[in-house]
Image (cartoon, rainbow, N blue to C red):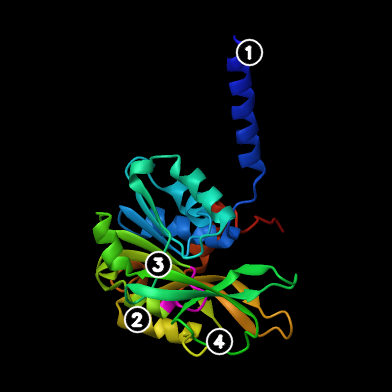
Amino acid sequence: MTSQEIAKLQEDAKKRLEKLQRPLYGSPHSRLLVRTMVEHLMPPIRTVVDCCASDSRWSRDVIAPLLPEKETHYLLVEANDFQPYRVGMEEFLKVNRDKRKVVWKGAWDREGDMELIQQESIEKGQWNNFIAQVHEPGAKVPGWDVVKRTPIKTIRLDAEVQRQQMPGPYFLKIDGHGSCREILEGADLLLDQTVGIEMEGYGCRFHEKVMLFNEMITYLENRGFLLYSMSDILPRSTDGRLWEVEMFFLRRENPVFSTETFDYNAAMRKGLEAGILERTTP
């Protein structure tokens, strides 16, 4: 074996070790819900639309391991052209690149020119890349005294999947920082072929256009989707008020909604099989 071959093996081993050591994105409960939806409750997904995808971590860690690598299309949309995000995206694009597309624009209800508004972090002069929202140019955000404004282009999700020629059925994930309604308003045609949704829900109206989680449940019910489950409740640190919760939706006609009863014994069996519950002996 040549020195170059040995070096390559060492580099491959290092990358595998780093992958094993990297914490997975999402809680075990939320990953289990997505797995249950994909493996048992939905028809085969042709395209995953990951909106506000940051560095691709949700697509990479949560749903990609559940889907056939060579057949599944991915559309990742991210408005914040942040260097660490680009590194993660490029890593995700190394596999099956012809079916994985990244769009560095904001998802909205119309296509055009908008602004990405960011709050300043605790460290003075550092911009918080995890509190970023798309707004009309020049918009004021109550409570945000210091902001960074970046001009961006916006797209409609339904137009973008057509441009990229990505087929349904779709699974839609939205991490919208309060802009979920605007994103969904730009996804009319996509929603017609969407079989599952994961998205943030909010307990506080931190700007005037935010829909609270209960309002979003009603909104999506009117669009043909029912709430399947929730996970990852995040309280506000100052007083414990609900700040955010992860919500999961399936189409209204999904068989999971055909019964409203609770089978205790079946639930216990499934919990034991999934490792959620531990068997105890008297």
Check disc 1 and report its element: helix, strand or loop: helix
Pick the quarter of the image with the C terminus. Answer: bottom right
Disc 3/disc 2 C-alpha distance (Å): 12 Å
- Please name the amino acid that badge 2 sits on: Glu
Among numbered discs 2 and 1, the one appearing first in the sequence: 1
- Residue drawn at (46%, 55%) of the image: 35
Residue 158, quarter of picture: bottom left
Q: Say few, some or many: other residues with alpha carbon within 10 Å of mark 3 (under 14 / 14 to 19 / 20 or more).
A: many
- Please name the amino acid that badge 4 sits on: Val
- Residue drawn at (39%, 69%) of the image: 153
- Give the residue number, with chain letter if any, for mark 3: 197
- Please name the amino acid that badge 3 sits on: Ile
Coordinates of residue 76 in the picture (x, y in percent) = 42, 57
Disc 4/disc 3 C-alpha distance (Å): 28 Å
Callout in the foreground (2, 1)? 1
Q: Are marks 3 and 2 in contact (CB under 8 Å)?
A: no
Disc 4/disc 1 C-alpha distance (Å): 58 Å
Tell me: residue 272, above or below residue 196.
above
- Give the residue number, with chain letter if any, for mark 1: 3
- Give the residue number, with chain letter if any, for mark 4: 141
Coordinates of residue 30 in the picture (x, y in percent) = 54, 62
- Give the residue number, with chain letter if any, for mark 2: 221
- Please name the amino acid that badge 1 sits on: Ser
Q: Classify residue 198 as left or right of residue 279.
A: left
Disc 1/disc 3 C-alpha distance (Å): 49 Å
Residue span colored magenta: 175-180
Q: Decide whether residue 99 is among the magenta residues.
A: no
